[in-house]
Amino acid sequence: MPYHITLLLFLLLPAGFLRHSQPSQAFDRANFYSIMSTGKTKDVNEELITVRASEIKEKQAYEGALLMRKAGLMKIPAEKLHFFKLGYIKLEGAISTSPENAEYRFLRLTIQEHAPHIVKYYHQIDADKTIVIKEFKNLQPDVREAVREYSKTSKVLTPQDF
């Protein structure tokens, strides 16, 4: 009898383990931009899990932007700085490997525009704006929509730019 129980556990345990290790949802770019815009800490954390579990090529940039967004939601200054630095490394790494990627530049522009002046993360705003405007028509439709929505409240981008 113990042999049958062991065999049953051996057969069932891996199936249960694999089912729970899968991401709860697939990555959705429109949802990502919605969370970047209005997400709460819980939403940002859940989206980080989704991005980390995905196989998308933009993973590093998205994770970096989410970490920097999370930094803005933290209450403790040390946590703010910690998450901002982690995100900075990832987003800047993605941009350095693909400097003409307008979506990455848009992500950085949105972070730079809202980053506290003390972190001195504002030097590429004009260059990022130029690339986003120039490459706007080549962006994916959901990214173009995010840019349009962002431009309605931005001090850097305006709806007339597009």
Image (cartoon, rainbow, N blue to C red):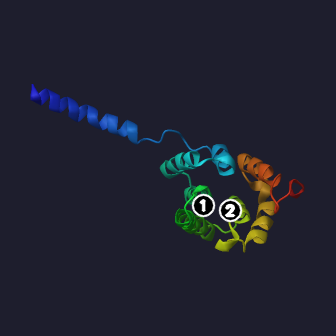
Q: Label 1 is placed on what type of residue?
A: Met
Tell me if residue 117 comes above or below residue 22 in the rendering.
below
Left/right placement of residue 56 relative to residue 104 reads left
Question: Can you tell which quarter of the image residue 26 is in?
Answer: top right
Left/right placement of residue 23 relative to residue 1 reads right
Tell me if residue 93 comes above or below residue 61 in the rendering.
below
Q: In the image, what residue occupies the spot 27% across and 32% down?
A: 12
Q: Are the residues flagged by discs 2 and 1 in contact, CB closer than 8 Å?
A: yes
SS type, badge 1? helix
Q: Residue furthest front?
A: 76
Left/right placement of residue 105 relative to residue 159 reads left
Q: Position of residue 95 (x, y in %)?
A: 63, 67
Number of residues whose C-alpha sits closer than 10 Å to that of mark 2, classed few (under 14), some (14–19) or many (20 or more): many
Q: Residue furthest right?
A: 160
Q: Position of residue 77 (x, y in %)?
A: 56, 65
As drawn, the label of residue 54 is none
Left/right placement of residue 101 relative to residue 25 reads right
**The C terminus - image quarter:** bottom right
- Write down the residue under mark 2: 111
Q: Pick whichever, 111 or 15, lies toward us.
A: 111
SS type, badge 2? helix
Q: In the image, what residue occupies the spot 67% across and 71% down?
A: 121
Query: Who comes first in sequence, dot 2 or dot 1?
Result: 1
Q: Label 2 is placed on what type of residue?
A: Ile
Q: How far apart are the alpha carbons under marks 2 and 1?
A: 7 Å
Q: In the image, what residue occupies the spot 53% across and 51% down?
A: 48
Q: Pick whichever, 44 or 159, lies toward us.
A: 44
Q: Position of residue 131 (x, y in %)?
A: 77, 65
As drawn, the label of residue 68 is 1
Q: Position of residue 114 (x, y in %)?
A: 71, 62
